[in-house]
Amino acid sequence: MDRQDPLRAVRQKFRLPKNKDGKTAIYFLGNSLGAQPKTARNYVAKEMQRWANLGVEAFFEGDEPWLDYNRRLNPLLARMVGAKTKEVVAMSSLTVNIHAALTAFLKLTPERNRVVVVGSPFPSDVYAVDSQIRMRGFNPTNCLRKIAPRENEDLVRIEDIQHYFQQNGRQTALALVEQPSYLTGQAHDMELLTAFAHGEGCKIGFDLAHGFGNLNLKLHASEADFAVWCGYKFGNDGPGGVGGLFVHENHHKDQTLNHLAGWWGESLQRRFKMRPDFIPDSTAQGFQISTPSPLQLACLQASLEIYDEVGMRNFVQKQRLLTGYLEFLIGDLPHSFCEIITPASPYFRGSSLSLRVRKQPRKLVQALRADGIFVDFRNPNIVRAAPNPLYNRFEEVFRFSEILHAHAGR
Ligand SMILES: *Cc1c(COP(=O)(O)O)cnc(C)c1O
């Protein structure tokens, strides 16, 4: 499989973490912090040099001024997430972008005062939603709802999501959905969820923390109102790297959207005019708040170029084989040791598999690290393994499975 893999050369474009003995580790943790593209260092060095040579004029001088660095990346970014160029912006980091999107899209009234989240969301997302509800003078105890898996189940059933909207849709202002779930790896049919929400007049946004650079997204076609992501997980744009925001063009002419205003949200033409009134750019660029770092954008560029060369279709084609192979190999482990909780259908998951480990999951993760493997532990008993189609090999999946079987036999 490695020999036949059309993406086999892409691995050479990354620096992969090493073990203490200097050998390359089996890095199945790109869902937490993606590996470093080799070009990132050169691109950062280039911007450091421009800073040294040009000082503040680097914002305006030359063919690649900092002033519109993120706009130059937009075509690559848009292709990657299936959006129009004007619907995306590389900006800030994830939780900030959740706040920026909710500030615009969350409108609570006494009749429609609920916000719903799905599954077992990442705590930071819930903190953000909670505070946005309180800012509007409402009480999260009543207003924040969750569509949870049924008792003794790990995944959220689509009929339960549909049922929620049928029962509560008219009281619900907005749904925020992790796509896919950071914990279980469950992904949803975005078009279907959007249809449920819009059918009842609710807004819907997706948190693509684990979807950006992992799922073959079709954001424009999904009709979702907005989406947000971080770039440092599958997106490989480095620790604390720049995230992003999608705003569907349906909203670009909406004058009632409340922006977290800042001068970077104004059009390029207006930004340096220093006018007393804020007029946001009508595209997703209008959601920017303050000056982005060219050093971070350089790292993002390095990763986006690789994705653009590979294409998300080819990425997902290998993902199905690579993650499918992992599922096949570890599927025979005794359930008294561990079981896979991620959906079995490749349409409802990405690269990552989540395992419920019955005995001392944290210790297992430490033992695997000693064996040269990076995976991680999430409360209460979940081990996540994410082979990455850009840089992992089928042979690494095989070796991981052999080692896991050896631990199961102990
Ligand atoms: C990783 C992750 C975050 C992290 O947010 P930052 O603002 O980048 O620190 C938030 N939400 C989800 C769902 C995540 O997976």
Image (cartoon, rainbow, N blue to C red):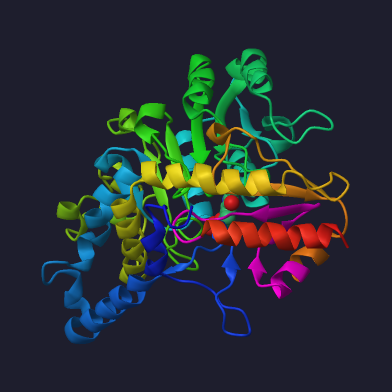
Magenta residue check for 390: yes
Residue 409 in the figure: left or right of residue 285: right
Residue 340 location, quadrant: top right
Horizontal and vertical percent for residue 47? 26, 76
Q: Residue at x 65, y 45 (%)?
A: 327
Q: Residue at x 47, y 53 (%)?
A: 389
Magenta residue check for 78: no
In-front residue for pair 147/392: 392
Count the numbered circles shown.
0
Horizontal and vertical percent for residue 58? 19, 75
Q: Which residues are magenta?
A: 367-392
Residue 333 in the figure: left or right of residue 299: right
Residue 346 in the figure: left or right of residue 127: left
Residue 117 location, quadrant: top right
In-front residue for pair 64/111: 64
Horizontal and vertical percent for residue 163? 67, 16
| Above or below, comparing residue 374 to residue 213 in the picture | below
Horizontal and vertical percent for residue 112? 58, 22
Q: Residue at x 51, y 42 (%)?
A: 320
In this view, which residue lies farthest toward the left?
62
| Above or below, comparing residue 237 to residue 348 in the picture | below
**Residue 229 seen anywhere in this rendered image of the structure:** yes
| Above or below, comparing residue 196 to residue 32 in the picture | above
Which quadrant of the render holds ligand 1? bottom right
Residue 129 in the figure: left or right of residue 146: left
**Residue 128 seen anywhere in this rendered image of the structure:** no
